[in-house]
Image (cartoon, grey):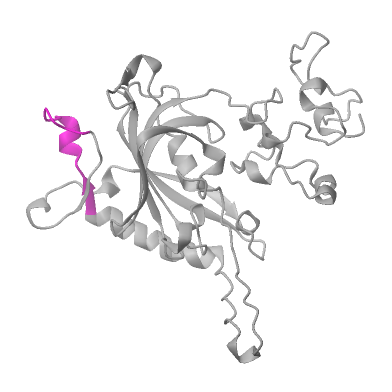
Amino acid sequence: MKNWILLGVMFSMVFVACNNDDDAAPEADPPLELSEVIAEDSAEIETFLDTHFYNYEEFASPPADFDFIIDIDTIAGDNSDKTPLSQQMERLTINLESDDLGLDGDETVEHAYYLLRVRERIPDGPKPTIADSTFLKYEGQLLDGTSFDENQNFTWLELPFTDRGYAEGASELVAGTSAGIIDNPDGTVDITDRGIGMVIFPSAMGYFAGGGPSGTIPAYSPLLFKLDIGLFVEDTDRDNDGIPSILEDLDGNGNLLNDNTDLDSELLTGIILPNFRDADDDQDGIPTRDEISDEDGNIIIPYPDSDNDGTPDYLDPDN
């Protein structure tokens, strides 16, 4: 996924300087509220699940030339007897807050998303977390079938920098193993035991009112991603501070971008880094790794709390 895919929604406004006020660009409409959008998104997704199916029969009995790619089609005509996605996908939920999307207000709204597990080498096997660097292939589509982004070669992506729905879906799928790696003649690789699945999620877990890359995704669009999960780096440590990125999600809400212990200090410098990207989480001048390690460089568990105030030293600028 390209660098433009980030967790949450980024709003941009272009200001045009004009000599004549009559030529000024019209003011953009404010984004809708979470509760208003989720009702419409949910109805659209549920209708889609009831009226579409995937090529489950090919996966159950793969033909010799099968490419192991998920194909979606409408239940109609010769396909009238197919099992709908609504009977094959798991319904999962997360809570999103207005602040997660930079919206005014204080709404907390449950959002349902849907997961399809097509192939897993070991049920309940190892999976990446939403914070891990993951080696995968993907294709992103609108519910009308329009493809807006894909990478059919395995590539490394850090899930905190992708769409929230994408990261949640990827973290639910069992990965492949290094034993399944095959080097292709063209320089690419395949992973024969990769996990294969699909996730469908409402717009607030994607781009919401932002329109996606270069405006290619209409505002308030539910999204679908087909995912092949190859490998992942267990306990990815993005900033190499000795603390796995997943443990730097301090509020446990799945959004690593809003955990920033030293935000007030960083606002003075203009360099804003959430904890999982910050090698000095309390900006006291002592690297986090030094505050959690002994003299030999061994990490101390539990992390030291010198003044016993309940806040470990690496998050406490007073220590």
Which residue is the extreme one toward the left? 78
Say whether residue 287 is left or right of residue 185.
right
Give the residue displayed 64% in from the left and 26% down from the top: 244
Which residue is the extreme one toward the top? 296
Where residue 25 sits: x, y (%)? 58, 81
Q: Quadrant of residue 109?
A: bottom right
Let me know if residue 66 is in the magenta part.
yes
Say whether residue 208 is left or right of residue 86.
right
Q: Is residue 221 visible?
A: yes
Work out whether residue 235 or residue 10 is closer to the camera in this orientation and state it: 10
Say whether residue 9 is left or right of residue 65.
right
Work out whether residue 168 or residue 124 is closer to the camera in this orientation and state it: 168
Give the residue displayed 15% in from the left and 47% down from the top: 82
Q: Quadrant of residue 45?
A: bottom left
Q: Quadrant of residue 229?
A: top left
Give the residue displayed 75% in from the left and 19% down from the top: 302
Where residue 306 sits: x, y (%)? 89, 22
- The C terminus lies in which quarter of the figure? top right
Q: How many marks?
A: 0
- The N terminus lies in which quarter of the figure? top left
Where residue 162 sits: x, y (%)? 51, 44
Where are the magenta residues, as a range?
Answer: 52-67
Give the answer, above or below, for where 229 lies relative to 182: below
Let me know if residue 75 is in the magenta part.
no
Q: Is residue 312 visible?
A: no
Where residue 143 sits: x, y (%)? 32, 57
Work out whether residue 244 or residue 137 is closer to the camera in this orientation and state it: 137
